[in-house]
Image (cartoon, grey):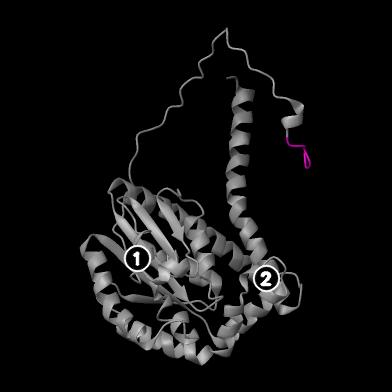
């Protein structure tokens, strides 16, 4: 290639890199719109807000680079990692999960978000449907809510009996010790927000048509039963905070700080190292003079709506 071709290639590579970073920028723009709708205002961001957003974005990209190293280390060393994300509705679990997985390989790092159990699953051993999703060697699994549903929503909403509730607390410490003994690293996060912050986030979702799908009747009911959920959380933490799998509390009223704090803490839990890979040489494209590319029919093409 001549110099002009090389410069053009560099420009294209730059644009491609910026496009990948724009994915996170789009999420941040959505956050800003989300907050403005909830606050009932659309004031321009102050210089302090802009600077804070820039710092957040810079730190997040740095941490996501470390997550890529962690992913490679987990895959190369055949580690098995399970991370549980629990907390009140609208506490920010989904936001941090998005940022953790955004630049990772879904074959290595996957998310499990199970619906309510069906009729058949209700007759199974309680942990059975979760066991199916545990990692194999070289995998990380992030549970967006987990077997701790029984200690939270099922207890508060009356979806389990007192006997089932007590059996859960007898079983879960041994279940988690068994996972750890088998070689799984188990990390448990509880995202903690105040009553006022949850109220604000629910209002934001009510008034945002792109977020209303996040509000379920169960979410709304949780507002009326705030104190019951608090009591259930306190019992859960007291009875399942074990040395082999302790709980870690993330203060989540500031969702951006919560994301950064959680990701940094997650990285600190594993002695990962960068996996050094040999340089990649892109092989030359082999061309055959007798190869003829067949034209694609125009009626198969997606129209160029935005070109």
Task: From the top left corner, tell me how far across and down residue 96 is, in percent.
Answer: 50, 65
The answer to whether residue 63 is above or below residue 189 is above
Near-viewer residue (157 or 44)? 157
Q: Residues within 10 Å of mark 2 (few under 14, many from 20)?
A: some
Q: Main secondary structure of the magenta part?
A: loop
* Residue at mark 1 to residue at mark 2: CA–CA distance: 32 Å
- From what the image shows, is residue 63 above or below residue 207? above
Q: Nearer the viewer, residue 240 or 297?
A: 297
Q: Residue tagged by mark 2?
A: 212
Which range of residues does the magenta coloring cover? Answer: 302-307
Q: Position of residue 7 (x, y in %)?
A: 62, 29
Query: Which residue is found at the position 41% from the left and 65% from the top?
Result: 264
Q: Percent position (x, y) of residue 212?
A: 67, 70
At 58% from the left and 89% from the top, the residue drawn is: 224
98 in the magenta segment: no
For the point 40% across and 75% down, the residue is 148
Q: Nearer the viewer, residue 97 or 39?
A: 97
Quadrant the C terminus occupies: top right
The residue tagged with tag 1: helix, strand or loop? helix
Q: Which residue is mark 1?
A: 128
Is disc 1 in contact with disc 2, using a CB cutoff of under 8 Å? Answer: no
Counting residues from the start of the chain, the first of labels 1 and 2 encountered is 1
């Amino acid at each position: 290639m001549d110099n002009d071709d090389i410069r053009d290639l560099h420009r294209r590579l730059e644009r491609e890199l910026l496009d990948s970073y724009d994915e996170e920028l789009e999420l941040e723009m959505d956050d800003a719109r989300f907050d403005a709708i909830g606050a009932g205002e659309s004031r321009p961001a102050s210089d302090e807000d802009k600077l804070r957003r820039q710092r957040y974005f810079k730190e997040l990209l740095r941490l996501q680079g470390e997550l890529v190293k962690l992913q490679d280390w987990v895959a190369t060393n055949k580690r098995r990692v399970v991370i549980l994300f629990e907390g009140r509705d609208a506490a920010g679990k989904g936001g941090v999960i998005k940022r953790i997985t955004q630049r990772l390989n879904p074959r290595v790092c996957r998310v499990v978000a199970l619906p309510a159990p069906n009729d058949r699953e209700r007759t199974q051993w309680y942990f059975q449907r979760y066991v199916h999703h545990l990692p194999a060697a070289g995998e990380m699994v992030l549970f967006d809510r987990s077997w701790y549903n029984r200690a939270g929503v099922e207890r508060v909403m009356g979806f389990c009996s007192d006997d089932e509730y007590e059996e859960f607390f007898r079983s879960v410490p041994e279940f988690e010790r068994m996972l750890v003994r088998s070689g799984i690293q188990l990390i448990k996060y509880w995202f903690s927000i105040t009553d006022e912050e949850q109220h604000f986030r629910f209002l934001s979702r009510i008034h945002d048509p792109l977020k209303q799908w996040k509000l379920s009747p169960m979410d709304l009911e949780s507002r009326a039963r705030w104190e019951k959920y608090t009591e259930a959380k306190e019992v859960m933490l007291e009875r399942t905070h074990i040395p082999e799998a302790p709980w870690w509390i993330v203060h989540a009223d500031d969702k951006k700080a919560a994301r950064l704090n959680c990701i940094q803490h997650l990285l600190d839990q594993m002695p990962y190292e960068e996996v050094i890979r040999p340089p990649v040489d892109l092989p030359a494209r082999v061309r055959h003079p007798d190869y003829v590319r067949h034209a694609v029919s125009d009626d198969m093409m997606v129209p160029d709506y935005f070109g």
